[in-house]
């Protein structure tokens, strides 16, 4: 040491995310505007990028409301740290609509079948379904139910969700044909739910959420 002050340049870490085909670069740290190491992907998408389609509900990986597609796979964005997503290709519900062809076929099927009520959980359900159909254009009813096993819908629209997705998959079987539309008279919905929804998708789990 010769007594001269030594300056060490600390390189700030930066991460890059591609979200709905747009590239974003973030600095990581605890300074103003930085992505903190503890920041979740839900937070980044909703509060930094204004993509509020993915909902923040349980914030614990239990409800599926915050689902996004990361490199082809549906993930709970509330359980992913943004710093760990460096280089990932993310699709949110806002990214599904095609500028030329309009809404995604899954979105169209949901509208056609009235497959939602509150709509709060719908973006997550559509995103999970999209990831499934991206890897398997003709999933079986069991594969659809299994894929949605991490999504919770607290109303009674599950059966129309399954009907929309099964129609899209080409599973026009007799069992599905017996289901009525959400706005039709439902005489005895409980046995229908018990019979068709064996997955946690409709297991009665209640998860509180706020509508902000
Ligand atoms: S908010 Fe992420 S799983 Fe519920
Ligand atoms: S559509 Fe949201 S709880 Fe059923």
Image (cartoon, rainbow, N blue to C red):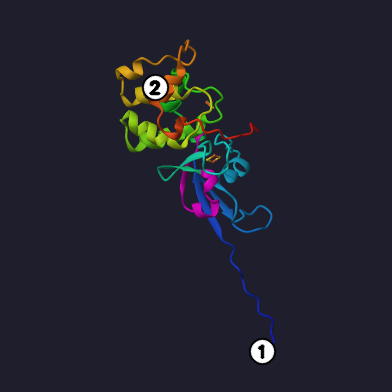
**Image position of 153 with respect to 39: above or below:** above
Give the distance between the C-alpha atoms of the residues marked 1 and 2, in whole angstroms. Answer: 77 Å
Residue found 66% across the figure and 52% down from its top: 33
Specify the segment rendered in magenta.
77-93
Q: In this rendering, does residue 144 appear at all?
A: yes
Q: Which residue is mark 2?
A: 163
Query: The residue tagged with tag 2: helix, strand or loop?
Result: helix
Categorize mark 2 by other alpha carbons within 10 Å: few (<14), some (14-19), many (20+). many
Q: Viewer-proximal residue, 149 or 2?
A: 149
Q: Residues within 10 Å of mark 1 (few under 14, many from 20)?
A: few
In this image, 4 relative to 98: left or right? right
Question: Of marks 1 and 2, which one's residue comes earlier in the chain?
Answer: 1
SS for callout 1:
loop
Residue 104 place in picture, x, y as percent: 43, 28
Q: Residue furthest bottom?
A: 2
Left/right placement of residue 150 relative to residue 49 reads left
Return the x and y of residue 164 as percentages of the image width and height.
40, 23
Instruction: Determine which residue is flagged by label 1.
Output: 2
Q: Nearer the viewer, residue 131 or 207?
A: 207
Viewed as shown, does residue 19 lie left or right of 72?
right
């Amino acid at each position: 040491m010769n007594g001269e002050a030594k300056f060490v340049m600390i390189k700030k870490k930066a991460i890059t995310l591609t979200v709905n085909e747009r590239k974003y670069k973030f600095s990581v740290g605890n300074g103003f505007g930085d992505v903190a190491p503890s920041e979740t992907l839900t937070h980044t998408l909703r509060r930094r990028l204004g993509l509020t389609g993915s909902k923040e509900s349980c914030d614990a990986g239990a409800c599926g409301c915050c689902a996004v597609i990361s490199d082809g796979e549906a993930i709970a964005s509330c359980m992913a740290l943004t710093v760990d997503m460096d280089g990932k290709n993310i699709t949110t519900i806002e990214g599904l609509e095609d500028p030329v062809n309009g809404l995604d076929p899954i979105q169209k099927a949901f509208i056609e079948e009235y497959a939602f009520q509150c709509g709060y959980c719908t973006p997550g359900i559509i995103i999970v379904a999209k990831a499934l159909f991206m890897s398997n254009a003709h999933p079986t009813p069991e594969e659809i139910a299994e894929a949605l096993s991490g999504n919770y819908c607290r109303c009674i629209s599950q059966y129309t969700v399954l009907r929309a997705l099964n129609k899209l998959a080409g599973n026009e079987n007799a069992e599905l044909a017996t289901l009525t539309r959400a706005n039709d008279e439902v005489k005895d919905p409980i046995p229908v739910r018990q019979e068709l929804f064996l997955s946690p998708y409709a297991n009665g789990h209640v998860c509180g959420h706020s509508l902000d």
